[in-house]
Structures are given as C-alpha cells and as structure tokens.
Image (cartoon, grey):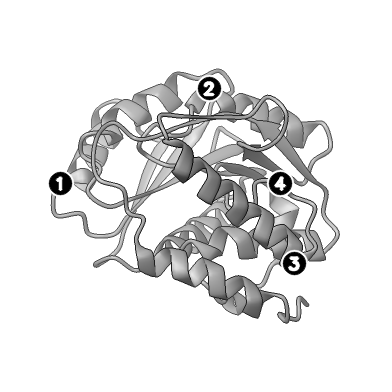
C-alpha cells in the first residue's frame, strides 16, 4: 500500500458516474486510493471499475462486490473493515454522483491532519451551501439536522452529512456489530457514536450539488428510519 488515504464509494447502478468520479479522485494530489463497494449493480458498474483497475489504476483502485442491495450502512462498514485491515490512516466516505466535490477530499484530510478525529463536509456551517435543490427540500434537510441535534444533544450542524474523513483511531474504537441502522440514519449514528466517545469532530464547509446523472437512492422508508431512529438512538449505550 502506497497511500495512507482511502476513499470509500458505495455504488448501485452508477455506470454513468463511476468512471468520471474514479478518474477525478485518482487525479488529486495526495495519492488517494479508492474502494468501490458495489451491491450487485445490474447496469455493469462493477465491470467498469474492474476494467479501470486492470488497465490504469492497478494498486490504487479496488472493489468489493456484494450480492444485491444490502443498505448504505452495511456497505460502509464493509469498507471500514477493509480499510482497517489494509492499514489506512485516513478513511473517507463519498457519493459516486458528484454531489460531493472530490476536490474537497483535500480539505477534509487537512482538517484531520490538523487535529480533527472526524471531519464532516458540512452544508450548514458558515461557507456551506446547497446547489440545485428547491427551498422546500433545503428546509426539510436543515430542520431534520436541527431535530437530530435537539434530540441527541450533539453539537454537529450537518448531522445527516455523508461526506466525511475519519482518523483510523475512530473506526478502531467503534464496534461495528453494535451499529443499529443501515439506511439514512447510519450517518447520524456514526457521528453520534464518535461524539459520545469523546473524539473531536470538525465541520468543513462544502457545497453540496444534486446529482445530474442517475437516480437518487433516497426513499420514504429511509427518511422514516432516520426520524424514528433518532429517538431510539437517544437511548443507545455507547461502549
């Protein structure tokens, strides 16, 4: 392994994005490696990744293939386990659809190098923005984060953010088998467990841009899990 930094991208039917996002991450300064967790995409996403692995990015691009959609949380946990087994120090979460700007990986890593244990790409701190959402969707997202903060007493403004950088020691301290949620609430639970264990969380302002290619994986079921899951989370005992 020639890099200390691993970007984890879960995919399901992302053939329109995966090559471009891979090339962009590979082009960044800092020598990032990339791990794709593909949940049996029928559109050939995994085949594109494997071609890039063989032809251009051998030793820097990797894939874990799983059978069928098993949930965002389980995909990231599989990626976290892989990252720890392979000795990475900085482990990132990022979407495949360019809603997260890959250039901001450098800023998230810098925040961790400078003292953060978890750096969160935040839409709701000063300097953060959301592009291409209507005001109703923005308000719903903002008040969802406010609701989480009020219930969990957690001082993180963008509690549902999915663009993050962990220091290795954070993931080593979290018992993955104890994670309760696999959908949208997974992002909240990981921040909450990090917070409860006393790690330093820093929010880095980013601009979140709605996807242009492919279909969003968000659903009413996922949103419901987040709303009611937060109430259950309030009583989670974090070891």
The secondary structure type at the circle numbered 4 is: loop
The answer to whether the residue labelled 1 contacts the one labelled 2, judged by CB atoms less than 8 Å apart, is no
Q: Residues within 10 Å of mark 3 (few under 14, many from 20)?
A: some
The answer to whether the residue labelled 3 contacts the one labelled 4, judged by CB atoms less than 8 Å apart, is no
Q: Residues within 10 Å of mark 1 (few under 14, many from 20)?
A: few
The answer to whether the residue labelled 1 contacts the one labelled 4, judged by CB atoms less than 8 Å apart, is no
The secondary structure type at the circle numbered 3 is: helix
Q: Residues within 10 Å of mark 2 (few under 14, many from 20)?
A: few
Label 2, on which residue?
103
Where is residue 182 drawn, in percent x and y? 47, 69
The secondary structure type at the circle numbered 1 is: loop
Please say whether residue 182 is visible from this viewpoint.
no
Label 4, on which residue?
157
Q: CA distance from mark 3 to mark 2?
A: 31 Å
Q: CA distance from mark 3 to mark 4?
A: 12 Å
Q: Is residue 75 left or right of residue 144?
A: left
Residue visible at 20% across and 54% down in the picture: 41
Label 3, on which residue?
152
The secondary structure type at the circle numbered 2 is: helix
Residue 107 is labelled as: none
Say which quarter of the image contains residue 194. bottom right
Label 1 vs label 2, nearer the camera: 2
Residue visible at 61% across and 52% down in the picture: 143
Name, please, the residue furthest toward the front: 136
Please say whether residue 37 is visible from this viewpoint.
yes
Where is residue 62 drawn, in percent x and y? 38, 44
Earlier sequence position, callout 3 versus callout 4: 3
Q: CA distance from mark 1 to mark 2?
A: 26 Å
Earlier sequence position, callout 1 versus callout 4: 1
Q: For the N terminus, which image quadrant?
A: top right
């Amino acid at each position: 392994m020639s890099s200390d930094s691993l970007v984890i991208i879960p995919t399901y039917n992302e053939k329109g994005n995966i090559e471009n996002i891979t090339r962009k991450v590979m082009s960044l300064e800092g020598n990032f490696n990339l791990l794709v967790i593909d949940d049996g995409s029928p559109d050939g996403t995994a085949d594109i990744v494997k071609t890039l692995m063989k032809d251009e990015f051998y030793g820097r691009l990797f894939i874990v293939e799983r059978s069928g959609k098993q949930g965002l949380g389980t995909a990231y946990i599989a990626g976290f386990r892989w990252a720890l087994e392979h000795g990475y120090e900085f482990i990132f979460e990022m979407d495949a659809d360019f809603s997260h700007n890959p250039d901001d990986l450098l800023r998230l890593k810098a925040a961790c190098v400078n003292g953060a244990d978890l750096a969160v790409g935040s839409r709701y701190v000063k300097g953060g923005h959301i592009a291409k959402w209507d005001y109703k969707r923005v308000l719903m997202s903002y008040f969802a984060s406010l609701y989480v903060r009020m219930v969990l007493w957690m001082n993180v403004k963008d509690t549902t953010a999915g663009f993050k950088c962990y220091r290795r020691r954070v993931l080593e301290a979290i018992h993955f088998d104890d994670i309760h949620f696999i959908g949208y609430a997974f992002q909240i639970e990981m921040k909450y467990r990090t917070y409860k264990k006393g790690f330093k969380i820093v929010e880095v302002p980013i601009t979140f841009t709605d996807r242009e290619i492919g279909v969003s994986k968000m659903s009413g079921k996922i949103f419901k899990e987040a709303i009611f899951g937060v109430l259950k989370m309030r009583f989670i005992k974090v070891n």
